[in-house]
Image (cartoon, rainbow, N blue to C red):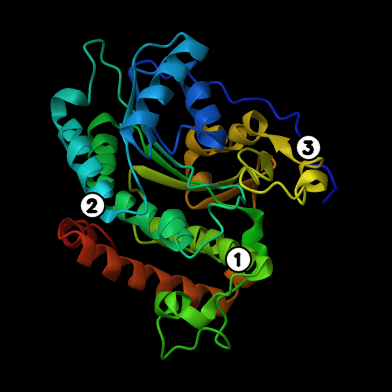
Amino acid sequence: MSSTLPTNFPVLQVDLTGRTALVVGSNVGLGFEAAKHLARMNPKRLIATARTEEKSKKTEEEIKKDTGFSAVECWPLELTSFASIKAFADRFEPMADPTYVITEDGFERLWVLCFYSYSNIDTDCLSPSSLQTNHLGGALLSYLLLPTLLKTGRETGHVSRLAIVSSNLHECVNFGLEKFPKDRDIFARMNEKDSLNTNVGDLANRYSETKLLNILFGRALQSHLSADAPLLVTLPNPGLSISELGRSDNSGQWDEVLKTARTTEEGSRQLILGALGEKGGVNAWRGAYLSDNEIRDVSEWVRSDEGREAQERVWKETLIIASKADARVAETAKLFV
């Protein structure tokens, strides 16, 4: 890999007439740029999210101003709060009504779910709460919206898309048995006080671990759906992008790193690819990891026997945690194979 990331990839252009797009985490950075790209593709409706009502209102106004697109709504959603996620899902659920599936012109609605989840390293995401922000919160939301995504795909004949933002940093870590033995849950171990110190190295390692969780969860989710399920899960890696990186740090430690980074607009093109790409046929995109505008192999460890076993452990533990957070997840689980 070169020291400077390639940046000249085109923005995938798709006519989204009659379709609905949802971008989670849209008030700054990659999510904000991805939402603007989608707004320019003329969707029937664009739903964006931010952590608070105040930020949601501001984000909605900015997207409208920057793109000239008026059919955008921004709803509050805080991934560190299961209560907020459940409230968001309650608000979203009525959209599963068949009257929302086909427009008066006969166009299908496409549900595009992009998890932004602070996919750049910054001082806010490098904390124990990143386990919920970067994985558990998004996983719960996925489970709660899954029936809607599948129903829409079945009734329209067009697959829904779920793009979970990943990172090449997943290659730096693993959940091997030395650190995560079988007699202890992976999440229980990650939550233990001695599993994470406050030094920068440990915090960066934790962030990489949450990005590995994204990879394992996304691949497991796709594998637990039937082979012909009308839902594609993709795992786009935006690459290191200049976002709110180091916004709380005035030490200058990020200055050299940022010289090799993409802009957030350039990084967001990978999210759009994950949400809309179909080159080579849609089946090639099921559970696909995307980097530098191509479908790539995940790390060697993820593909190993130990990695596949850890993937199932992550899947089962995540499902248990989500089921305890919301009883509806147990019904969703009936959809898995």
In the picture, the quarter occupied by the C terminus is: bottom left
The alpha-carbon separation of the residues under discs 2 and 1 comes to 26 Å
Q: Which residue is mark 3?
A: 6
Q: Nearer the viewer, mark 3 or mark 2?
A: 2
Task: Tell me: 148 left or right of 29.
Answer: left
Q: Which quadrant would residue 42 be assigned to in this image?
A: top left
What is the crowding at mark 2: few (fewer than 14 residues within 10 Å), some, or many (at least 20)?
some
Image coordinates for residue 297, horizontal then vertical, percent: 65, 57
Q: Which residue is mark 2?
A: 83
The amino acid beneath tag 3 is: Pro
Farthest bottom residue? 183
Task: Tell me: 115 left or right of 7.
Answer: left
Q: Secondary structure at mark 1?
A: helix
Image coordinates for residue 279, horizontal then vertical, percent: 58, 34
Image coordinates for residue 174, horizontal then vertical, percent: 60, 73
Mark number displayed over residue 221: none
What is the crowding at mark 1: few (fewer than 14 residues within 10 Å), some, or many (at least 20)?
many
Q: Which quadrant would residue 9 be assigned to in this image?
A: top right
Q: Nearer the viewer, mark 3 or mark 1?
A: 1
Q: Nearer the viewer, residue 325 or 235?
A: 325
